[in-house]
């Protein structure tokens, strides 16, 4: 779209900028892990750790500033995961839709039949690319094969309703065409038409669960809990049937709450990735004892694959709320922090 002149460089830069916080969610932990592996791998290979110990400086003293940095990055990650990232993804989706909607309204091709809108065929004689049309023909298609009715307008105006994802077409100086079942002629001063823009991809009024902020997720969970606490009654149900219906409703409640709970725990768990990666990266870098960059990057990629595999496994188990998939996202944090603590303790003692 940039090359063809449909959008400007500023729009592309804005879209790319809105995606940066989403990338930071993964880039900060991975960058911290790679940095610690590379630095301490070379630190150990050049015998600088031995020199520091000979000078009476422990490994814990050397790494304290790095752990403070990792904790600060955890706070930054939490801000990105819980607030900035979701809002930027919603803004990106809205920007992309507005862009496509604007292109749709401004570039209805002249001299061609347009079949992008289900149930209608359009023909535009002239389009000044600012929403003003001339010599417009609209054919309504019945059962996707037969033309039900048609009109021809001397002028037309296209407006985009962004909030409702609608294209409003106002036709002026309209005359009906004798087509199909409606063969009577008529003239109208103005005829409005409202069309769905990409109905299959039409966005809801509030963001998807994946694009909600932490506060929005908490509100969504609260609303689901209130809904699930509504009493179930039935005038013609026995006590056993009422209990069965209540169990079924509780299961449906878990199904509804599982995605929200998963996103809440995922956002919080992701925020601690920097600390876990740092804790395991320092002793591993010392144990690898290599100054080559490729070795450190290879180890970092392996650890990242292990960490995020738990996340994707938990995400795949969302459809089974009885497995509490939202708790699985905490497993890599506990695993990395436990293993890292043991390895760091051994490295500090020179084991």
Image (cartoon, rainbow, N blue to C red):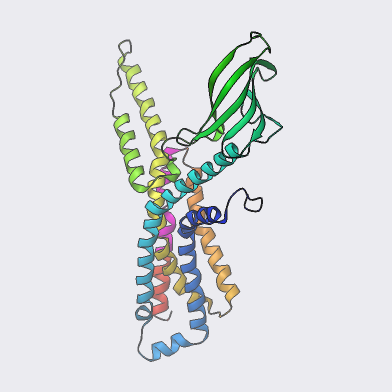
Main SS of the magenta part reads helix
- Give the image quarter of residue 138: top right
Rendering coords of residue 134 (x, y %): 63, 30
Looking at the image, residue 315 sits to the left or right of residue 103; the answer is left
Whether residue 119 can be seen here: no
Q: Which residue shows up at 37% across the image and 71% down it?
A: 69
| Residue in the foreground of this view, choosing between 1 and 299 | 1
Image location of residue 335, percent across then percent down = 43, 60
In the rendered structure, which segment of residues is drawn in magenta?
320-338
Q: Is residue 240 above or below residue 93?
A: above
Residue 130 vs residue 147: left or right?
A: left
Of 264 and 232, the residue lying toward us: 264
- The image position of residue 288, as x and y in percent, is 53, 76
Quarter of the image containing the C terminus? bottom left
* Residue 193, quarter of the rendered image: top right
Q: Where residue 273 appears, x then y in whole percent? A: 42, 61
Residue at image coords 36%, 29%: 250
Q: Nearer the viewer, residue 5 or 28?
A: 5
State whether residue 309 appears in this view. yes
Q: Verify whether residue 322 appears in magenta.
A: yes
Q: Is residue 53 above or below residue 83?
A: below
């Amino acid at each position: 779209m940039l090359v063809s002149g449909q959008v400007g460089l500023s729009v592309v830069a804005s879209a790319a900028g809105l995606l940066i916080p989403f990338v930071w969610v993964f880039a900060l932990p991975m960058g911290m892990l790679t940095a610690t592996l590379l630095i301490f791998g070379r630190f150990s290979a050049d015998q600088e750790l031995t020199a520091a110990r000979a000078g009476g400086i422990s490994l814990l003293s050397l790494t304290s500033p790095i752990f403070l940095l990792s904790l600060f990055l955890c706070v930054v990650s939490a801000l990105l995961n819980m607030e900035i990232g979701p809002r930027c993804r919603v803004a990106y989706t809205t920007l992309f839709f507005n862009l496509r909607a604007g292109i749709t309204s401004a570039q209805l091709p002249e001299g061609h039949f347009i079949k992008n809108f289900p149930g209608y065929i359009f023909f535009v004689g002239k389009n000044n690319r600012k929403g003003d049309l001339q010599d417009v023909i609209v054919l309504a298609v019945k059962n996707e094969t037969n033309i039900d009715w048609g009109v021809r307008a001397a002028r037309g105006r296209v407006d985009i309703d962004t909030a409702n994802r609608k294209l409003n077409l106002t036709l002026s100086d309209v005359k009906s065409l004798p087509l199909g079942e409606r063969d009577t002629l008529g003239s109208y001063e103005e005829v409005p038409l409202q069309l769905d823009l990409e109905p299959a991809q039409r966005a809801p009024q509030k963001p998807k669960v994946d694009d909600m902020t932490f506060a929005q997720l908490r509100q969504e969970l609260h609303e689901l809990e209130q809904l699930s606490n509504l009493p179930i009654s039935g005038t013609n149900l026995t006590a056993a049937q009422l209990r069965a219906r209540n169990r079924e409703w509780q299961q449906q409640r878990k199904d509804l709450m599982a995605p929200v709970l998963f996103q809440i725990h995922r956002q919080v768990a992701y925020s601690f990735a920097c600390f876990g990666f740092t804790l395991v990266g320092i002793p591993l870098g010392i144990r690898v004892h290599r100054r080559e960059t490729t070795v450190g990057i290879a180890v970092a990629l392996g650890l990242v694959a292990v960490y995020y595999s738990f996340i994707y496994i938990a995400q795949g188990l969302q459809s089974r709320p009885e497995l509490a998939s939202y708790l699985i996202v905490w497993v890599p944090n506990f695993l990395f922090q436990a293993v890292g603590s043991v390895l760091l303790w051994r490295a500090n003692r020179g084991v």
